[in-house]
């Protein structure tokens, strides 16, 4: 027996270490909730995928909220406008990207078997260029970190959000998650830390929904294919980059006439890239005919929303009414002065 004593002590120590380390890493989920919000790309969508700059604006009034509550059993249940049911059954649904993100978060918190109810309450229309998937990812990541009282810096938040964005969008630049988690307009260049931009002092953006689902993945793929078939289209991408730089100067100078003209030029280039369509063109034309200083699609295009620049609140109200008349299913306003 004497020969076994050192071996038994070793086993005891190993087991004790294993048990204690489990005690350290096993964490308790608490009820938590977190928010994020919509975004609108002022200029630079699509070109931003290829390294050009883009300017995007957070829209905090259009909110996404995620509530997370632990359950005593091991059921993992999701309630949302997009998907209702068990996490395990989401793999083949439109919720698959967010479901993968949730599974990765559970692994991070050593909680793969933790039961929970996750409720997503969203003001954002899905697939309309307002960042619904990125806003969901941001709020989910925040909710899990809050539930485990874990620190989360902004760079880590964006890395987490990229997990679902890659699955949903294929080749995301990261601008959507950066803006859905920001409180200032963003100057965004892929792979670089986003920078906050100063807002103009006046002017109102009117966002209008065509009511048609855009599909970011397909739109981004279509542009990639176009660039492969016709390398000369690269000029459209660099042209959009130049317009974005000019837009930043116009914003800093409160020069809305120039900013509007720049938005119109960007719309021409996006249409030439093949991501506009008839409903977008109709709303853009209506906004311009009713006093918009400029108008263009926002986000991936091929449906989704348009963005119109109005000089002031009363012009914005006229444009919004005209857009509704022209078929917009919903409109929102973002006042630079507020
Ligand atoms: C989508 O909101 C914006 C795109 O430029 C794609 C991206 O940057 O990931 C179309």
Image (spheres, rainbow, N blue to C red):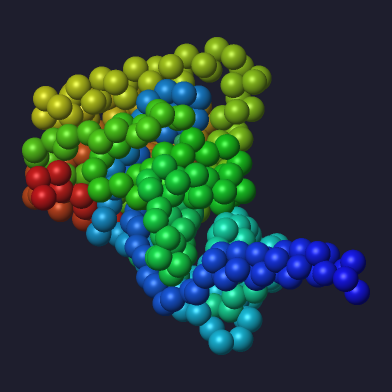
Left or right: residue 199 compared with residue 95: left
Residue farthest front in this picture: 2
Q: Of 32 and 220, which appears nearest the observer?
A: 32
How far across and how far down the image is residue 222, in percent? 60, 33
Furthest residue toward bottom? 72
Whether residue 129 is visible, yes or no, is: no
Picture coordinates of residue 32 (x, y %)?
39, 72
From the viewer's perspective, tell me whether residue 16 is left or right of residue 56: right
Residue at coordinates 11% horizontally, 50% vertically from top-left? 338
Q: Is residue 6 left or right of residue 20?
A: right
Q: For the point 45% across and 46% down, which residue is it?
A: 156
Q: Is residue 170 something one can see in this rendering?
A: yes
Q: How many marks?
A: 0
Relative to 95, does residue 228 appear above or below in the rendering? above
**Residue 309 rendering spot, x and y as whole percentages:** 21, 39
Residue at 25% in and 20% down: 246
Q: Does 18 sit above or below residue 286? A: below
The quadrant the N terminus occupies is: bottom right
Q: Position of residue 114 (x, y in %)?
A: 59, 75
Which residue appears at 65% of the width and 64% of the height? 17
């Amino acid at each position: 027996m004497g020969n076994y004593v050192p071996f038994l002590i070793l086993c005891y120590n190993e087991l004790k270490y294993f048990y204690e380390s489990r005690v350290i890493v096993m964490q308790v989920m608490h009820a938590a909730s977190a928010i994020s919000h919509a975004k609108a790309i002022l200029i630079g969508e699509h070109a931003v995928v290829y390294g050009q700059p883009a300017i995007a604006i957070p829209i905090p009034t259009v909110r996404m909220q995620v509530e997370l509550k632990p359950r005593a059993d091991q059921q993992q249940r999701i309630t949302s406008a997009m998907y209702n049911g068990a996490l395990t059954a989401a793999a083949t649904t439109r919720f698959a990207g967010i479901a993968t993100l949730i599974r990765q978060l559970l692994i991070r918190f050593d909680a793969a078997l933790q039961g929970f109810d996750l409720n997503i309450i969203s003001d954002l229309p899905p697939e309309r260029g307002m960042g619904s998937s990125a806003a969901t990812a941001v709020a989910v990541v925040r909710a899990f970190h809050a539930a485990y009282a874990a620190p989360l810096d902004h760079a880590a938040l964006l890395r987490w959000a990229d997990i679902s964005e890659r699955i949903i969008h294929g080749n995301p630049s990261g601008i959507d998650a950066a803006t859905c988690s920001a409180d200032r307009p963003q100057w965004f260049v892929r792979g670089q830390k986003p920078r906050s931009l100063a807002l103009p002092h006046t002017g109102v953006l009117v966002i209008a929904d065509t009511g048609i689902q855009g599909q970011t993945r397909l739109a981004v793929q279509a542009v990639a294919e176009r660039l492969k078939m016709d390398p000369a289209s690269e000029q459209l991408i660099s042209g959009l980059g130049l317009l974005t730089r000019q837009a930043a100067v116009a914003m800093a100078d409160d020069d809305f006439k120039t900013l509007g003209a720049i938005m119109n030029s960007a719309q021409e280039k996006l249409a030439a890239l093949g991501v506009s369509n008839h409903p977008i063109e109709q709303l853009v034309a209506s906004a311009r005919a009713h006093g918009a200083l400029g108008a263009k699609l926002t986000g991936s295009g091929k449906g989704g929303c348009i963005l119109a620049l109005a000089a002031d609140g009363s012009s914005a109200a006229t444009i919004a009414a005209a857009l509704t008349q022209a078929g917009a299913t919903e409109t929102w306003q973002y006042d630079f002065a507020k």
